[in-house]
Image (tube, grey):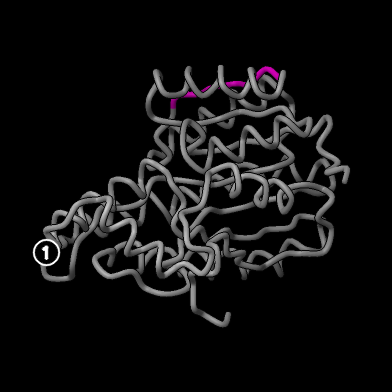
Amino acid sequence: MDLQLNGKVALVSGGSQGLGLATAIQLASEGAQVAILGRSEDNLEIARKQIEQQSGKHALAIVADVSKPDQIQEALGRTLERFGVVDILLANAGGPPMGTFDKLTDEQFYQAFDLNMMSTVRLIRGVLPSMRQQGGGRIGVIVSQSAKEPIPGLLLSNAMRPGIVGLAKTLSGELASEGILINCFAPGRIRTARVEWLDQNIAEQRGISTEMLEKQIALTIPQGRYGKPEEFGKVAAFYLSFANSYVTGQTICVDGGKIKSLW
């Protein structure tokens, strides 16, 4: 299948590792020019080289903290300066910290809101003029399985991710007539640094090894294993591509069947 990505420009936040990087690699491998954002210059340089080695396409790496409005604006400006347009956006940011209601502060709620919700709002706002000028575009937002069903101990994620889905669903109706499609991606247990960190914390709380915890969690996944970042990247790349012409406003689960929600 031709994903119709040749000559397209994709901006991927949180693109220096994990699911963002996996998607950036896949988009570049299918012909897109890719700009990746991340907070660590060292990680970005490693990611840039990895994208170029696996795809043969040059990538633009930009240091940016997406919880900071000025850094988002600068990153957008550099991307447009380099490529002229942005056809595709994957909005992705690190997950907020673990915590239960009694232990979380107002400041932590505000930080999670800036990191997850407002970064998505600002990134979308920033790319829309270019997409409208081009006559269309594709937007994706990485959320979490917490957008479908709450995860114990992750109250901030459980609170923020469904709001992002609501934002995307509303925008899908507002933007569809302009040829701009927007979908969310809800990963299940995919083996990333974030999931490994969560597993370590949960295992410590339960007084068991991370290996034992992984075995227990794998039993709750119908496919019986954790997913691989590249498996997520392939799914995301299709829905972000111009081969996808009629799916918008959806939250696509990439979870091996783990999420029990009907919707």
Along the line of sight, the residue nearer the viewer: 128 or 14: 14
Q: Residue at x 70, y 42 (%)?
A: 88
Q: Residue at x 59, y 49 (%)?
A: 232
| Residue kind at label 1, given as amino acid type | Lys
Q: Position of residue 47 (x, y in %)?
A: 51, 24
Residue 76 position (above or below residue 140): above
Q: Residues within 10 Å of mark 1 (few under 14, many from 20)?
A: few
Apparent side of residue 172 relative to residue 212 in the rendered image (left or right): right
Q: Residue at x 54, y 35 (%)?
A: 21
Please state, as top left, top right, bottom left or bottom right, where the C terminus lies in the image.
Answer: bottom right
Residue extent of the magenta highlight? 57-63
Along the line of sight, the residue nearer the viewer: 141 or 210: 210
Q: Residue at x 55, y 30 (%)?
A: 36
Q: Quadrant of residue 101?
A: bottom left
Q: Secondary structure at mark 1?
A: helix
Along the line of sight, the residue nearer the viewer: 207 or 120: 207
Magenta-span inclusion, residue 168:
no
Q: Position of residue 6 (x, y in %)?
A: 84, 32
Q: List the residue tagged with mark 1.
A: 103
Q: Position of residue 262 (x, y in %)?
A: 56, 82
